[in-house]
Amino acid sequence: MLSPQITEKIDYELTKYPAEQSQAAVMSALRIVQTERGWLSNESMSEVAQYLGMPEIAVMEVASFYNMYDLAPVGKYKISVCTNISCMLRNSDEIVDHLKHKLGVEFNQVSEDGKFCLKEGECMGACGGAPLMIINNHTMHEFLTPAKVDAILDELK
Ligand code: FES
């Protein structure tokens, strides 16, 4: 069941749209639920569908299309490294290899301590700061080097 904290936030999002267009708040609702629960289970998506009065499949289509939604647990910190062309040309491969080695994971795996999950990200529209990564869909770190990655991980531990 969606918590009162979640429904209060979703209700606020719903005020932004006409009453008969509640499905317009689906992306916000998924973000709110994911922030509260860490990831989006099938049950969570069903609850969102029910709350917004839309088909479950439509909610799942949205959640599975955008890579900021996590359909499996991602640990405390989800690290998404952009590997698209600008970042690739600025050595994102080196950053990815360094993170894999340091965390002991491959893409889409969670580290043994449950803290970190490594994801391959798409262009984040910040190519001028390549190579870069974003943590928990929120905090972006640009101009990465292995040493800079180490300092960021040390801060998160
Ligand atoms: S290619 Fe990495 S942010 Fe655009």
Image: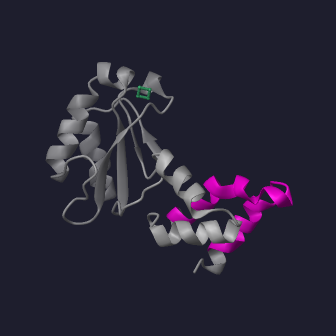
Magenta-tinted stretch: 6-34
Judge whether residue 153 can be spotted in this image.
yes
* Residue 47: quadrant of the picture: bottom right
Q: Whole-percent x and y of residue 15? A: 81, 60
Determine whether 67 is above or below 84 in the image.
below
Asked whether, in this view, residue 2 is left or right of residue 95, the answer is: right
Asked whether, in this view, residue 127 is left or right of residue 91, the answer is: right
Q: Whole-percent x and y of residue 137? A: 47, 49
Q: Whole-percent x and y of residue 43? A: 49, 72
Residue at 49%, 28% in the rendered image: 126
Asked whether, in this view, residue 101 is left or right of residue 25, the answer is: left
| The C terminus, quarter of image | bottom left
Q: Where on the image, by quarter, is ligand 1?
A: top left
| The N terminus, quarter of image | bottom right
Asked whether, in this view, residue 133 is left or right of residue 33, the answer is: left
Q: Is residue 13 magenta?
A: yes
Residue at 47%, 46% in the rendered image: 139
Residue at 53%, 66% in the rendered image: 45
Residue placed most toward the observer, 148 or 66? 66
Determine whether 47 is above or below 146 in the image.
below
Determine whether 84 is above or below 73 in the image.
above
* Residue 30: quadrant of the picture: bottom right
Q: Whole-percent x and y of residue 25? A: 70, 56
Q: Is residue 31 magenta?
A: yes
Mostly what secondary structure, the magenta segment? Answer: helix
Judge whether residue 31 can be spotted in this image.
no
Determine whether 63 is above or below 134 in the image.
below
